[in-house]
Image (tube, helix red, strand yellow):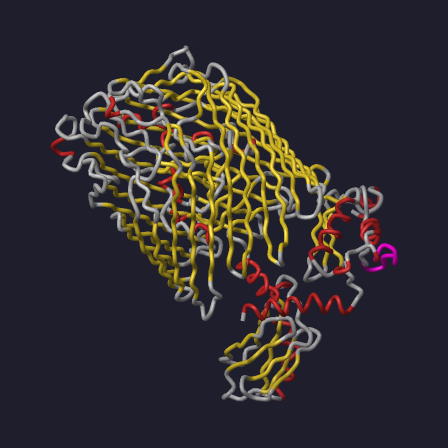
Amino acid sequence: MKKYILNSLILFIPCILFSQVTFRGMIMDRNNSKANLGVDGASVHWLNTNVGAVTNAKGWFAISYKTEYKKLVISYLGYKTDTVTIRNLEPLHHFITPQSELEEITIKSKRNAVQKSTFSTVNMFTVNSEELLKAACCNLAESFETNPSIDVSFSDALTGTRQIQMLGLTSPYLLITQENIPSVRGASQVFGMTFTPGTWVESIQISKGAGSVVNGFESISGQINAELVKPFSDNKFFLNTYSSLNGRLELNTHFNQRVSKKWQTGLYIHGNYRGQKFDKNDDNFIDMPLANQINVMNRWQFTDAEKGWVSFINVRFLNDEKQTGEIEFNPLIDKGTANNWGSEIDTRRFDTSAKLGYVFPELPFQSIGFQMAYSNHQQDSYFGLNAYDIQHQSVYSNLIFNSIIGDTRNKFKTGLSFTYDKFDELVNTSNFNRNENSLGAFFEYAFDNLDNFSVTGGLRIDTHNLLGIFLTPRLHVRYVPWEKGVFRASVGRGKRSANIFAENQQLFASSRQINIDDVGGNIYGLNPEIAWNYGVSYMQKFNLFGKKGDITFDFYQTNFQNQVIVDWENPQEIAFYDLDGRSIANSFQVEASYNLAKNFNLRTAYKYFDITTDYRRGNLQKPMQPQNRFFANLSYETELENEKQWRFDATFNIIGKQRLPNTSINPVQYQLPESIDSYQLLNSQITRVFSNRFELYLGGENLTNVQQKNPILASDDPFGSNFDTTIVYAPIFGRTFYAGLRFKIK
Amino acid sequence: MIGFSGQSQEVKKKKNAKVSFEVDGICGMCKKRIETAALKSKGVKFAIWSVKTHQLSVILDERKTDVKKIQKNIAAVGHDSKGFVASEEAYSSVHPCCKYRDEEIILDHEGSIKKQKKKTE
């Protein structure tokens, strides 16, 4: 560059001497910026004049200059026309950008909000931020309401926490990662999803079936990965507020700042608050907990593209407080007494993680990545007279080497991982302490014939202090039999230790006795859970009446070799015991999406679940699990005009008949029917985009106003032996409305 | 120094040599065809073709192959590069939308770019 300027100065000195009033410059191509090649034949002219010139073969031009000429217009076929303000006679060096880059942006905005790839070997789809906005509220757990592959259910009548399920299995059987670092596990299993604010999420990748061996051995039915917003690409400033008629207030702000050429930082602050008590169903218990949460994250992103280094450093602190129970409950007076029933759940969590990646500059197919994370999760809680505290400290580290065998059709990943988990639990008066550590090595090979066939096979070996030494194999195959049709199959094994209290902590808000069948295993006297997952899937993209659509058929089976059975079938107790017999979860799903008209899309799905387990009292369907579900989502948006737009979205669900846990030994007034009939739910949202910077949204949840009549058993006698808040099969809160705004500065 | 290089016979053949040359084509389908043909050549580790610049960048093992062999394999699937013109038979095998020797088809592709541009305005 310097050389060029110098050369050009020497070259042009004579000219400058002759005519002082000539302005010179060089036009270069942004796409070839390294080569500094000039653009031949680009035209330049002064704005609103006929004075113009054309660049020579080296990209240089000379144009006569007068002081009143201030703005130079640069144009070249196929490139964007630029107007540059000229302040002095120093030679101009200007890069022009190809028009096609503009075109690429257009295609991006036309991209579907949910992308299903025909190229990926794994049955995976990506949910991008556009789709996430449809569920305006508010955290990761609530991001799946417009998504048919993930079912959202309620964990208990008190906290209103939503539990997610995939293939009919609850979240402990899923691997939930944040930027590929396991995040929702152990102590954070129940509430962890609610600890990631929705605005922090850039996109979500959902993979069904056996996952990859790279991220560990725990996943059984699938993986959900949340990519967070990145300081380099997120808005400079973002503000979101939300308010709901159910008393919930939320505030999100993002600040992103460039620190130097290679460093960028972002500060993300989330707060939510609910201070109002509602008791719409007159059971003397508040319908939704009082809550307040402060959640602060600071990210640092480092990029040095030339040398091939990238890095992320994250620090996060969370404080979450919930209070629920009877309306008159006052924790200062009533805690630990039988005056009024109440509960408080206080969580403090500190997370830090660092990622370092290096791409060999000379070998773009080869890279090394290192991930390291530490978290400390502390929950102190009581539920009436039951106390439950858990502290979970966790260390995760993973070293991954990516390269090829021969050529890029044969890729592999290999590496080492180390994890350490320390659990300290207090359950009423009993202490449960446990340390887990594991060291593992993995190898994953991927073949792609670049046409119609690809396969990914992985194997890992881990040595774990409580689970022993074991192998984890996983295999995924993709085959394209004909145009736009993709057939996929997968098989894999998973193994994990069940955190029986943390995963089922709703049990504390009941009078059920805890009964653990100690068989001398390493985890609460129980053995680790082991399952194989098999799946097949077929997707066909099509064109019907000139509009695009796709249809997917999925069948998955999870077959447990051992499972820690959570048995709710006796209303007086909750029993945990090792599986003796069969436990199989079958799920079938057919999903179709179709573009009905321009900007008007339909997505619909039917799901069938058959989840049966050998309980002590016989083989039963999983309780509170609808066998049939139907889903439909309609979305429409108007054409973008002067940055203005309307967006409409509606989601309809039919939740089929559900079996309830057995309550037949309860007194008659506390008995529930054997099963509960199907019901329908409708959510809707309208967004008004006023400009690139500002938008407002308004929505309604549960518009059909479905309410579970009696979500708390024996709510009139909370300290009696029949009190139970755990049987929840429908929304507790009726119809509600919310509104929010988003403001951003690029 | 001269003596040394004389002893080590010719220029040392690189295991990961980076080479870039122009290959004629138009669209994303061409890209896939060109890259696949390059990768299927023995000794080619990595190949990427730019729709915009028509440059094919490859990383190859010079002990096993050379650029001419790659160019030959690319010509065999119907794409021209300097000194290697695809036979009529190979050229006729490419998809009709990839007929890069046809001015009209090139214009068609440019037209689609223009259309897209209109949409954004």
Q: Residue at x 45, y 36 (%)?
A: A176
Q: Is residue A149 left or right of residue A412?
A: left
Q: Is residue A608 visible?
A: yes
Is A611 a magenta residue? no
Which region of the structure is painted magenta? B81-91
- Residue A404: image quadrant is top right
Measuring from the top left, give residue A256's x and y in whole percent. 40, 55
**Image quarter (top left, top right, bottom left or bottom right) of the C terminus of chain A:** bottom left
Q: Is residue A245 left or right of residue A602?
A: left
Is the residue B101 above or below the residue A536 in the image? below
- Front-most of residues A605 and A97: A605
Measuring from the top left, give residue A743's x and y in whole percent. 36, 60
Measuring from the top left, give residue A292's x and y in whole percent. 25, 43
In the displayed orientation, state which residue is furthest to the top: A520
- Front-most of residues A10 and A671: A671
- Residue A38: image quadrant is bottom right
Q: Is residue A528 visible?
A: no
Is the residue B11 above or below the residue A412 in the image? below
Q: Residue at x 62, y 45 (%)?
A: A360
Measuring from the top left, give residue A60's x and y in whole percent. 65, 76
